[in-house]
Image (cartoon, grey):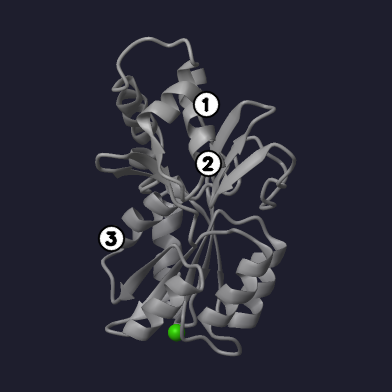
């Protein structure tokens, strides 16, 4: 299944160029040239990614982004004018996952697109539910895009499943149940290995390393913080 990308750009030549390049890469592409039409299209369709110019007729890109974000988690890469620092900052504040400065090399844009699609999969393969985020239910712990589902023993990041062993799961659950509280290795050891466990507390460091390799490294986040001489903590998610 090829990813669907909506290109929102009012400069027709540029829009056409990007469209052709993306199609050449195998993406399904549609284009829109006004903010209002783009918002309607984005809300009605099931896009995996939106490339959004900021300076647009009718409704500017930032406004499109704000309104879209209230309804859907579709990742957005902003196309900004050179040196428009304010645009970049307000764009990222408004929820864009990345921005590319015009004029850009097409290879750079393609690389940013690949990264955004990998990090923010909204339409899970085989899933027919469109862009709706998973509902939060009893027994779920949330950390931004990460959901730890206790009854189903399942962890997902942006809908992407993370495969954990029982002890890794228990460790992550314990840290998420105590966000902003630094837990010592002894506390974690009791939770994860049980009171009867006899052995080195540095087994905890090993599990932390596994968790980081499966979460932090894969999704480019800094989830579990080391507090030197004390232990580990997951701080509450700040978007
Ligand atoms: Ca424009």
Of residues 87 and 215, the one nearer the viewer is 215
Q: Please report the residue visible at 35 percent of the width from the left and 25 percent of the height from the top.
A: 204
Q: Which mark is residue 170?
A: 1
Q: Please report the residue visible at 71 percent of the width from the left and 41 percent of the height from the top.
A: 128
Image spot of residue 28 (x, y percent): 54, 53
Residue at which label 3 appears: 108
Residue at which label 2 appears: 176
Label 3 vs label 2: CA separation?
Answer: 36 Å
Query: Is the distance from the Cβ of mark 3 to the nearest ligand 1 atom less than 8 Å?
Result: no
35 to 76, vertically: above or below: below
Say whether residue 117 is visible. Answer: yes
Image spot of residue 63 (x, y percent): 57, 81
Q: Which mark is residue 154?
A: none
Q: How many marks?
A: 3
Pointer 3: residues within 10 angstroms few (<14), some, or many (20+)? few
What secondary structure is found at the residue carrying circle 3?
helix
């Amino acid at each position: 299944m090829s990813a669907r990308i909506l290109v929102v750009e009012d400069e027709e030549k540029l829009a056409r160029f990007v469209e052709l390049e993306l199609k050449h890469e195998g993406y399904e592409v549609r284009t829109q040239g006004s903010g209002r039409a783009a918002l309607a299209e984005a809300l009605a369709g099931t896009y995996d990614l939106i490339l959004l110019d900021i300076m647009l007729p009718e409704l500017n890109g930032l406004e499109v982004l704000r309104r879209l974000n209230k309804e859907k988690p579709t990742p957005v890469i902003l196309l900004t004018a050179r040196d428009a620092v304010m645009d970049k900052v307000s764009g990222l504040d408004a929820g864009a996952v990345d921005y590319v400065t015009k004029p850009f090399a097409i290879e750079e844009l393609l690389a940013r697109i690949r990264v955004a699609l990998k990090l923010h999969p909204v339409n899970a393969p085989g899933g027919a539910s469109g862009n709706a985020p998973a509902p939060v239910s009893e027994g779920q712990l949330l950390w931004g895009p990460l959901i730890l589902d206790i009854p189903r023993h399942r962890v997902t990041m942006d809908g992407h499943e993370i495969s954990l062993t029982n002890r890794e799961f228990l460790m992550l659950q314990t840290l998420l149940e105590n966000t902003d509280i630094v837990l010592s290795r002894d506390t974690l050891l009791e939770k994860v290995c049980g009171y009867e466990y006899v052995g080195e507390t540095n087994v905890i460091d090993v599990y932390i390393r596994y968790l980081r390799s499966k979460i932090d490294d894969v999704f480019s986040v800094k989830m579990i913080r080391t507090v030197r001489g004390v232990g580990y903590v997951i701080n509450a998610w700040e978007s």
